[in-house]
Amino acid sequence: MIQALGASQGIAIGKAFVLPHWEWELPDQKIDVADLAKEFDRLYEGIRRSKTEINQMRTELDEVVGSEEASIFDAHLAILEDPVFMYEIQGIIQRQYKVAEVAVKEAIDHFVTMFDLLDDEYMKERALDIKDVGNRLLKHLLGAPDISLPEDTQPFVLVVRELSPSQLVHLKPDLVLGIVTMVGSPTSHSAIMARAFGIPMVMGLEGKLEQIIGTGDLLIIDGGTGVLQVDPSSETVARYTDLRRRQISQREQLLSIAELPAVTKDGVSLTLAANISSLKELEAALSNGAQGVGLFRTEFLYMDRNQFPSEQEQFEVYRAVVEKIKGETLIIRTLDIGGDKQLDYYELPEEENPFLGFRAIRFSLDRKDLFKTQLRAILRASHFGDVQIMYPLIASVDEVREANTVLAEAERELTEEGIPHQANIKVGIMIEVPAAVAIADMLAEEVSFFSIGTNDLIQFTLAVDRMNEQISHLYEPYHPAILRMLRTVANAAHKNGIPVNICGEIAGDVNALPIWLGLGIEELSLSAQAILPVKESMLRTKASESRQLLEEMFRCKTAAEVRALASQFHMEAAMALGNIKPLI
Ligand SMILES: C=C(OP(=O)(O)O)C(=O)O
């Protein structure tokens, strides 16, 4: 068994097809000075063909999975128009008299090496984009065919060193059972698209691909746990076949509770809202019974494009979302850029610790022009439904007040311009910085709700980088320190009569449900796939028993003890109903 990173849920069992690395032989010749112009013409023709092809793929993808995913190709077009990339290629041709193919290859290698050295997940993804675009350009210059997948064979599990979005777009979901890549992280564009296509995927295998898997090997991949089995025994195949069948039928059965209210056995309700970053994700969330949106990560509207989105563009998206959720609440988080989320068209300063740096509300308060544009768009959308605003990474009362001053200005402007919007829009904050926990009582007096961003709160509290695989075992949501922080925040909020939401990934862990019920949390905001499992858990859980369990958890000194209590509670409730049997 090999442990990799789970990037797209689901189990795939099938024969491997190992995609060869995209490498071509390049002509080993120099050009005459007199032929320079001709060589540039060849380069420009290659660029033109590459752009046409990318535009075609963009249109195809738009039809299949939607414009959000298709916009990945805007980043590819931007590379072909990037003056720095182009100067590098032109410079090599002009100064070293190298043919266009060699110049393109050297430019790709130069930028990819530079980005890889940065040891930054985002830049590594950009390196992958450059390689993808550069290879396409090379293909056109050389007149080489596309590397194609077997079309007329049985469905297979695709194994590839790294997979670019443009390779992924050509995959036929009914032929590709699953995907294994050596390189990449679950936040990469390829992983996002695999999830959109519903193809199970594991990423980040260590070692040499060809030493691990060969074409024709039988593979099992579990995109939920990140487990990969190469040439498994017949017992393992039978076990995973059964697990796969049960996962599929569990998902189908769960759909039957999509319309039921999320209420515990003893009548306590908890709103189960959705975390989304696009309209496309909203559709999946709604079909899973989401009650509104608890976290709209707006930064994705700012990514994969060439400039900041205008007020009108943002307004149209926010309005479309609030209209789609029909009377439910939409919580829009203002731009949380920085950290691992960068913009191609705006250079954020290079930082030693970007997660602790110039990001989120700090960026917005520095660029009040951009912040006000976003607030105006949100306010305008608030005329069409229940929209609330949420500021990210708040660490002080001052930040809330300063942000509210910009909000008041935006509101005044709209009033003066006669543009309709909701008066006194509700404003809440993310609680994700330990300082905000310590002053939660003071912050609670300033805002209408809290939403605990456990992803960041855990990394900051435990001093464990959430992106660092080497210390991922220390990233522990069930740490007693985290439990205590959650209690501090819940108590401060409830004392001031404001609700508390949880929007970090831990909200989707069914074992954690008694913690939320015990603390009296009002809303969980979840990814689409997590909504129904959590609801199912709620329907067979008693809030009164959860409160007792939480008391016991608070007496535990280690995360392992807390975890054991949580999972035992969950298993007992499930087994009592006879709807869970141990999976493995
Ligand atoms: C929801 C959160 O924010 P992010 O978008 O950074 O995951 C969080 O930190 O829990």
Image: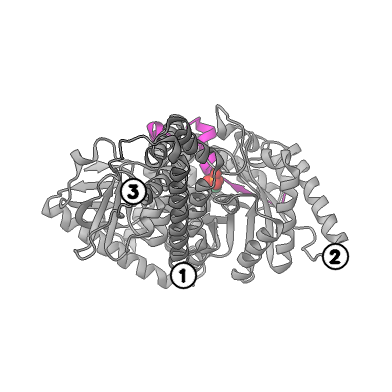
Q: Disc 3 vs disc 1: which is toward the camera? A: 3
Q: Mark 2 packing: few (<14 Cα in 10 Å), some, or many (20+)?
A: few
Q: Quadrant of the N terminus?
A: top left
Q: Position of residue 418 (x, y in %)?
A: 85, 65
Compared across the picture, whether 359 is left or right of 481 comes to right
Q: Provide the residue span drawn in magenta.
A: 446-473
Task: Indicate left or right for 224 with 44 as reference.
Answer: left
Residue type for callout 2: Gly
Q: Residue at x 72, y 47 (%)?
A: 371
Give the residue pinned by disc 3.
142
CA separation, marks 3 and 1?
Answer: 53 Å
**In magenta stretch: residue 126:** no
Extreme front residue here?
A: 34
Give the Cα distance between marks 2 and 3. Answer: 59 Å
Where is residue 383 shown, x and y percent of the image?
A: 74, 66
Query: Which mark is first along the chain, 1 or 3?
Result: 3
Position of 448 compared to 416: left or right? left
Q: Which residue is mark 1?
A: 258
Q: Earlier in the sequence, mark 1 or mark 2?
A: 1
Using the rendered view, name the quadrant where residue 476 is placed.
Answer: top left
For label 3, the crowd category at 10 Å Cα-Cα, with few meaning under 14, some 14 to 19 and many 20 or more, is some
Q: CA distance from mark 1 to mark 2?
A: 41 Å
Q: Which is closer to the viewer, label 2 or label 3?
A: 3
Furthest-right residue in view? 416
- The amino acid type found where label 3 is placed reads Leu
Q: How is the image coloured?
A: one colour
Residue 172 coordinates in the image, percent (x, y): 32, 63
Quickly name the residue at label 2. 418
At 42% from the left and 33% from the top, the residue drawn is: 97
Report the amino acid beneath label 1: Ala
State whether residue 415 appears in this view. yes
Nearest to the eye among marks 1 and 2: give it.
2
